[in-house]
Image (spheres, grey):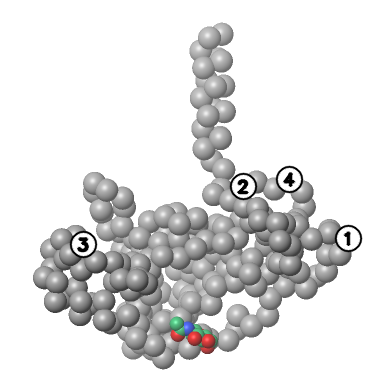
Amino acid sequence: MAAHFLFLALLALASSHAIASDPNQLQDFCIADPNSDVFVNGFVCKDPKQAKAEDFFFSGLDKAGDTGNKVGSNVTLITVDQIPGLNTLGITLARLDFAPYGLIPPHTHPRATEILTVLEGTLYVGFVTSNPNNQLFTKVLHKGDVFVFPEGLIHFQFNYGKTNAVAISGLSSQNPGVILIPNAVFGTKPPISDDILAKAFQLDKKTVDWLQAQF
Ligand SMILES: *[C@@H]1O[C@H](CO)[C@@H](O)[C@H](O)[C@H]1NC(C)=O
């Protein structure tokens, strides 16, 4: 009997750890009301009687993002900001465009796991586990391949081929967030002291200043 209760208690504990990163739903939907001046975790719901199909709709993901920038990539992220009906639903969609050899630099999504599929071209992707191992997992992905980047871990996507590449990602938050490592380290406003970065990266301060000047 005691073993039975222990089993149930462990089961309850295990399932309470299985919840997604966004809080669970208490109703069918909660369309974001961008005009509310109440601040909650997410957005206040607009009156459900005022719900329209447009609240759950976005058009334009067929259009490629402009990859004419330093890294040769562009992410079109469709979050609760574009689709107010996503509020509280714990999901987001993104289109990733790459010029030949284009890169989405190492970054993390603090609130979401990402699942990606390649529609066109070839991508070399990878993620790194937390300390102390910092193990790198990589894969070359072709059209139709799918890869997962676990929540919070640093990852990158690189166009391995001589043609453009396109991928679609689902992310497990209405607002996954993105922290680009180079920008969050060398491109901050105001800059992080070059003493700090020189020590952290074992560089001389001139190199740090040069890196900071690239942003
Ligand atoms: C991504 O593409 C959009 C649409 O073409 C463009 O407005 C935006 O500036 C691009 N972003 C970057 C970082 O190049």
Camera-nearest residue between 101 and 197: 197
Where disc 4 sits, the SS reads loop
Identify the image quadrant of residue 152: bottom left
> Could you tell me residue 84's position as x and y percent?
70, 66
C-alpha distance separating marks 2 and 3: 37 Å
| Image side of residue 2 versus residue 158, left or right | right
Which of label 2 and label 3 is nearer to you? Answer: 3
Which amino acid lies under the numbered mark 2 shown in the image of this protein?
A: Pro
Q: Quadrant of residue 212?
A: bottom left
Q: Is mark 1 within 8 Å of ligand 1?
A: no
Residue 23, numbered circle: 2
Amino acid of disc 4: Leu
- Dot 2 lies on which element? loop
Q: Quadrant of residue 50?
A: bottom right
- In the picture of the structure, the residue carrying the numbered disc 3 is 196
In the rendered image, which residue does mark 4 sit on?
Answer: 26
What whole-number distance in Å separates the C-alpha atoms at marks 4 and 1? Answer: 17 Å
Residue 214 at x, y percent in the picture: 28, 82
Question: Disc number at residue 49?
Answer: 1
Q: CA distance from mark 3 to mark 4?
A: 46 Å
CA gap between label 4 and label 2 equals 9 Å
Three-letter amino acid code of the residue under disc 1? Lys
